[in-house]
Amino acid sequence: MSARFVRTSLVFLLLGALLSPLAADVLELQQRVIEVFEANRDAVVRVKAAFRSEDGEDGRAHVTLKVGTGFFISKEGHVLVNASRAAGADRVWVEFKGKPYVAEPVGHDRLTNISVLRVVSPPEDFGFIPVDSGTTKPHLGAVVIAISCPLDFEPSPSMGLVSGMENKIGAQVFPTEYIRTSIAVDSGQGGCPILDINGRLLGMTVASIPDMDSSYAMPVEALIRVRDDILFSGHMIHSWMGFRVTEATETDRDSAVYLSSIVEGAPAETAGLREGDVLLSIGGREIANVADVPSAVFFTRANQYTMVKVRRGDEVFEVSVKTLPRPEKDPLIAPQPAAADAGVNPSEESGSGS
């Protein structure tokens, strides 16, 4: 037996010893993905919506079909789906294990791209995914699992990583902070649930980023905010304080967010806020840049009081602001660029505002 053969054999033995723990970890991860998928696959459905139009060139009515993924969130048959799939449809239904079930809209919010449906006569053997308010924010690099209905296939799993936590992309500011994952959503996959390795719901996809083969998901905390308003009111009630903000760099401090204008008679003015006040926090959520403002306002409730911390000169203090429902035409919300210009797929886009 040659010395070279012995050395080569030793190298392979050492590599085997080193890789065996890694192989065990990979098999454990694989088993967890299988278990999460099996536990939640019966909660995921394909959503189809028919839109009727009368403006065909031949003068005849035309029907457009939109397809997405949704998932049951209650025993009563409530389903979450993207508003870009269901809002404004003439007829909506879900497909579960190859069979169609009629659904009716409970309400939509185009700004966050969330709709709630209710399946009129749910299947007997469906599951549902709890929307748990105790879910914590995921760490960057955490493994996530999506379950979606691509093309005409049955619910299928995809695995990826949490790649970022962002409240804007380019010039487009999101209504709240989104989870960016390395999971691409396309061809009917939008609206799918994103789960952690333990099977807890982390969020729901609301936008795709085609240039990066990735997607944005709305976190559970924000989903609960939208879901509750739609279930109780039929629509999301966005709150409003009536100010515009701008970001500037101070000579003796880091960058700060200022109140640059306030609507006369708006809640902000009534509470005593002034132009030039430095905005520090809203409802306990710190404000580091202008993109933090819409997200903080998002979690306030209309017609309820919210504490707003500001700095005026050298004095730091809090005021209690009673917010109002956002006016349909808010003079302090500038038009945002089209989602496509910001690198977000318009077919799964979500709006923005503050």
Image (cartoon, rainbow, N blue to C red):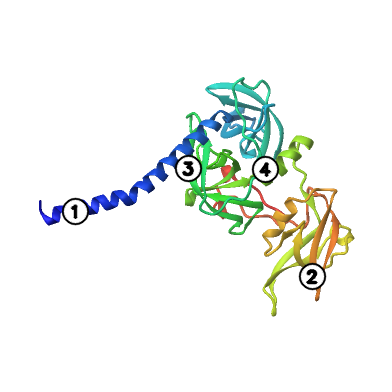
Lower sequence index among marks 4 and 3: 3
Q: CA distance from mark 2 to mark 3?
A: 45 Å
Left or right: 319, with 8 as reference point: right
Q: Amino acid at mark 2?
A: Arg
Are the two marked residues, 4 and 2, in contact with CB atoms closer than 8 angstroms? no
* Rendering quarter of residue 227: top right
Q: CA distance from mark 3 to mark 1?
A: 36 Å
Q: Amino acid at mark 3?
A: Met
Q: CA distance from mark 2 to mark 1?
A: 69 Å
Left or right: 49, with 239 as reference point: left
Residue 8 has which mark?
1
Q: Secondary structure at mark 1?
A: helix
Q: CA distance from mark 4 to mark 2?
A: 32 Å
| Label 1 neighbour load within 10 Å: few <14, some 14-19, many 20+ | few
* Rendering quarter of residue 281: bottom right
Q: Image height check: is 119 above or below 203?
A: above
Query: Which residue does the numbered mark 2 point to in the structure image?
Result: 311
Q: CA distance from mark 1 to mark 4?
A: 56 Å
